[in-house]
Image (cartoon, helix red, strand yellow):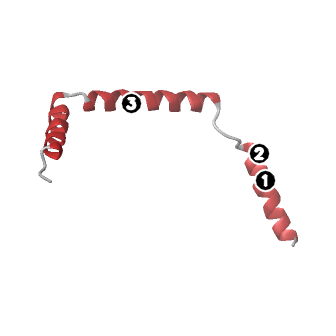
Amino acid sequence: MRRTRAWWAARMAAARRDAGMSTTEYAMGTIAAAAFAAVLYKVLTSGAVSKALESVIGKALDAPF
């Protein structure tokens, strides 16, 4: 019983020390997400990808029923 109580107290103390992201971590995460979105946008709007998507959609719409 005492061992369980000590383990639980240690877990609670650890949870209080690490409550979440700090402002710097939050800012870096936001910047990384925005950069990833920009790269993804550039890739999806490139000519090769656009032609491939048009081809796939065209084949799907042209399929016989």
Q: Is residue 59 left or right of residue 13?
A: left
Q: Give yes or no for contact between labels 1 and 3 (Cβ–Cβ under 8 Å).
A: no
Q: Answer few, some or many: residues within 10 Å of disc 1's Cα (few below 14, many 20 plus, some between 14 and 19).
A: few
Number of marks in the image?
Answer: 3
Vertical placement of residue 40 versus 62, above or below: above
Q: Give yes or no for contact between labels 2 and 1 (Cβ–Cβ under 8 Å).
A: yes
What residue did someone put label 1 on? 12
What residue did someone put label 2 on? 16
Residue type marked 2? Arg
CA gap, disc 1 and disc 3: 37 Å
CA gap, disc 2 and disc 1: 6 Å
Q: Give yes or no for contact between labels 2 and 3 (Cβ–Cβ under 8 Å).
A: no
Q: Residue furthest bottom?
A: 1
User: Residue 46: horizontal and vertical position, in percent?
Assistant: 21, 28
Residue type marked 1? Met
User: Residue 17: horizontal and vertical position, in percent?
Assistant: 74, 44
Q: Secondary structure at mark 1?
A: helix
What residue did someone put label 3 on? 37
